[in-house]
Amino acid sequence: MSKESGAVLDQCAPPFTEELKAGSGSTSHAPTARVTKQRYAPYLIFTVLASLYFLPFMRLFLQQAPEGILVYGALRIVHGQVFARDFFEVQGPASFYWLALFFKLFGVTFAATRICLFVTSLGTGLAMYFLSRRICSQYQALPCILLAGTYFGALWPSISHHVDSNCFALLSIVCVILWQDRRKIGLLVAAGALAAVTTCALQQKGILLLLALLVWLWMQNRRKSTLLSSLGAVAAGYSSVLALMVVYFWSQHALWDLFYANVVWPLGNYSAANVVPYALGLIRHCWDHFVIAKGFQWTIPASVLITPFLFIAALPALLPALAARYRTSPGRPEIVLYWLCGCGMWLSEIHRKDIFHLVFGSPLLIILCIYYLGRYRAKVADLALQILAISATCLAAFNLFLVLAARPLATRVGTVAVLKDAPALRVLDDKVAPGEEVFAYPYCPMYNFLSATTNPTRYSVLLYSYNTPSQFEEVVGVLEKRRVKYVLWDTRFQAKELATLFPASAHVAPGTLVIEPYLQSHYKVIWADADTRLLERKTDGAAR
């Protein structure tokens, strides 16, 4: 082997380097088998450890609204409805049909949702570990621990199009890295197909990922290290999946509905409702959660636990500062790929700049930051890595202990674990029969799934300055026409959460309200607590 070839191999990830070097210098099968074991052993160990960590989280129900949108939408699909035609959601169709597949395989149960979540979570973890090992010489598991610790909160462990899109996007990048070693065109086709699935889950993330992959391949072509046909392979995989989706929705007479729900409506409504300050939730959901629960004496431990979130929030400034030292040195192809795809993923999440969306946009940026810190030969860099490792491990362990303390709660779709009581579920079980219509307002669709009741409308979410006036009128028309007997009203969300989560929806003139006057005139409260009300329709003579 020439010196030049050896230099190229030394730039590869350790497992691939060992395999290629051993394979070129030996013809016996025993060394090859040994190298194969050495190559896959770290991933097998990681899979076992990650599974043991993830499994306790899979029993948890966080009582957060976004999960119910996807879960109940997948249930509609299992019952024969078509996304966008029969029910309206702004999220892409991929997450709905992905979860519906698990419902088909394992039944309509809470356990089926957690099997789906486990698969995507483990896929994300393995992809992160692979991509980290590719460029990081030390602290290779740290990006995975950081991501797992900061994932926990409003959007994980729960079904989310952010979780799904990250899994598919990272696996797409893994395919490109494998293609760089093996030069099998099928890997590029798979990368393009996974980028298309990412688009179907979170539109802007998949589109930016595709552009990043094409730009990277074009740059490699300019360096004469790849053929221009590689761009065509990625584009072919991407186009094939999108073509299948278009054909399906066209055959269901739902193509315009899909375009309206995922393109037209978001452009006019979605962004305005999601204008929030940068890193929203860093104090309210992280610092206050850690400190207030334990008092002033908990301040020092809380400072450790919040460090990973501060790191995520600082990444847009921290990472360029770290990379500036190496701006004149030629970057490895993988580094350039991570930069392009990482920036694309981050940009795809800043339509809402709260801390949790920043976390979902930062997987590749985390890896890059650990890589640059590892290259610094200064004590401050090593100290920073040690602080990150300690704080991320403490945060991940804290989350695990929190979940282990959750209490079981029996529902009609299986037992779940909750961190706080959910009396509304018990009331629904007592007063409402399975399959009966219950309109959950304004943002609590998971109650329909857990109580096995039916949403009579096309909407799981109904918010002012988010949904259009015609959609509000449509819901009132459905309630009136079908004489829907029960309404579950989440008053806590309107009173305490709405102003923070959707500021534009909180400032509505009383004279422009549509749903509230109708509910007050046509329904009566039959049960209430501090958070929710269960309303029952008045008789026709009593309604006014």
Image (cartoon, rainbow, N blue to C red):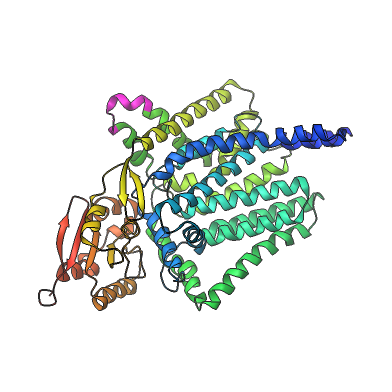
Residue drawn 24% across and 61% down?
488
Residue drawn 33% across and 27% down?
299
Question: Toward the viewer: 59 or 462?
Answer: 59
Residue drawn 78% across and 58% down?
228
> Where residue 516 appears, x then y in whole percent?
21, 66
Seen in the picture, residue 87 relative to 195 is either above or below; the reply is below
> Where residue 496 appears, x then y in whole percent?
25, 50
Query: Is residue 513 visible to us here?
Result: no
User: Which quarter shows the N terminus?
Assistant: top right
Q: Main secondary structure of the magenta part?
A: helix
Displayed quadrant of residue 77:
bottom left
> Where residue 158 appears, x then y in whole percent?
42, 49
Seen in the picture, residue 62 relative to 101 is either above or below; the reply is above
What range is drawn magenta here?
292-301
Residue drawn 46% across and 59% down?
103
Question: Toward the viewer: 383 or 416?
Answer: 416
Question: Toward the viewer: 222 or 195?
Answer: 195
Seen in the picture, residue 471 relative to 188 is either above or below; the reply is below
> Where residue 520 appears, x then y in whole percent?
16, 67
Question: Toward the viewer: 409 or 483?
Answer: 409
